[in-house]
Image (spheres, helix red, strand yellow):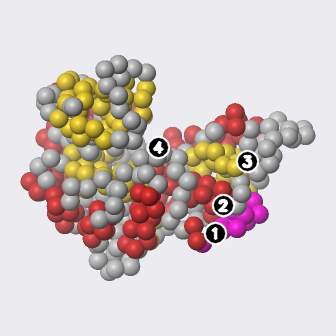
Amino acid sequence: MKTKTHKANKVNVVTLGCSKNVVDSEVLMMQLRANDYDVVHDGGMVDEPNIVIINTCGFIERAKEESINTILEYAEVKTQGDIEKLYVTGCLSQRYKDDLEKEIPEVDAYFGTLELPHLLAKLNADYKHELIGERLLSTPQHYAYLKISEGCNRTCAFCAIPLMRGKHISKSIEALVAEAKNLAKNGVKELMLIAQELTYYGLDIYKKRELPKLLHALADVDGIEWIRLHYAYPSKFPRAIFDAMAERSEVCNYLDIPFQHASDTVLERMRRQITRTEQEDLIAYARERVPEIAIRTTLLVGFPGETEEEFEELCDFVQKMRFERVGVFTYSHEENTPADTLPDDIPQEVKEARAARIMEIQQDISAEKNAALAGKTLKVLFDRKEGEYFIGRTEYDSPEVDNEVLVHAEKNYIRVGDFAQVRITEGQDYDLYGELVS
């Protein structure tokens, strides 16, 4: 079928998966714009692009299915003549390129996670080195993700990230500060530090863990008011991070630290290099050094061989630690990982039931903690207006995954992207309601 006529050189970049993919897409979009391409992000067909680039995720089975379904959807769009070119990049393409080329030949080319120059060359675009550190933001203008390293040297039994992203490579402090200054110049007030593994930062280039030093350097950047930490590995955690958090008001009292499990036997099978006692000691130290800290963790249920007794240990851990935020995943086999050799012997319905049980425990904890905030005044950064409410977040909440603060728009006016003092009037399971403090 003959391709329909659309605007020349208009690209729709579709991003799937985690915030690290978001950053990769933003870098790609800036490079394309510098090469005179008209670029939209997740624009769909309403923007009438003639080129679509899909940045895929290959982390877990559900994410892989979403990526494949999205590729198939746009392959059909191309077959119908509604776009001229279709390209695929990202983690799924890195890991399964040969299979994808055979199964979905409608795609014009597949690229891995580190092949941006090759993708640009395919579009007759130059890779502009002078734009290193610059991105075309797809997030609201007042916050941005800052990827401080690439890859991972950890050997967790269930994780395929090292297969897709390679070994750990840190960016220099100077490069990250320059990137932060550029973001601040363009209106960014909150930086969310991301990596496959934050605490490993600096070991490769400085021969020691330098995340605390980086935090101090970023906190000195004019215009940056919040710095948030995501994806910190608990084993050998550099406790000076808590010193930076306590000493610098710009570093949010917030830590995303995936513990995954609490049974020593499961942690050993997972190759997590830590015990439950060590995890609890770390949490106790964090709360002693930073009393206001909010800890978000991620847990994995249904790992091969997980017994009822081991799962009950995890439930006890959640009840005892009383985390501020919890996310739960169910285990799925990932090819060529160490756990792939183990029998996936927990039925899916049992996995789902265990995940639901954890979230039931956490829901009660969250409700209690939120109810206790009633009457307190908190600094809130407002992300958007939706319906009758302005919606924002405290320093204890990250976008999309954590609590939100709702302030009624009828009696209050707030500019999106601004901070405001809000008195909390009601705390529900996962939302807070409040009013502006004049």
**Looking at the image, do the residues carrying marks 2 and 1 touch, with CB atoms under 8 Å apart?**
yes
The picture places residue 272, in percent across and down from the top left corner, at 30, 59
**Mark 2 to mark 1 CA distance (whole Å):** 8 Å
Q: Check disc 4 and give the amino acid type.
A: Pro
Viewer-proximal residue among 60 and 431: 431
Residue 393 as seen in the image, left or right of residue 105 = left
Is disc 1 surrounded by few (<14), some (14 to 19) or many (20+) residues within 10 Å?
Answer: some
- Mark 4 lies on residue: 140
Q: Which mark is residue 117?
A: none
Which three-letter amino acid code belongs to the residue tagged 1?
Lys
Mark number displayed over residue 128:
1
Q: Disc 3 or 2, which lies upstream in sequence?
A: 3
Cα distance, mark 1 to mark 3? Answer: 19 Å
Where 160 sits versus 385, above or below? below
Say which residue label 3 marks.
10
Range covered by the magenta-colored residues: 117-129
Tell me the residue that label 2 is attached to: 34
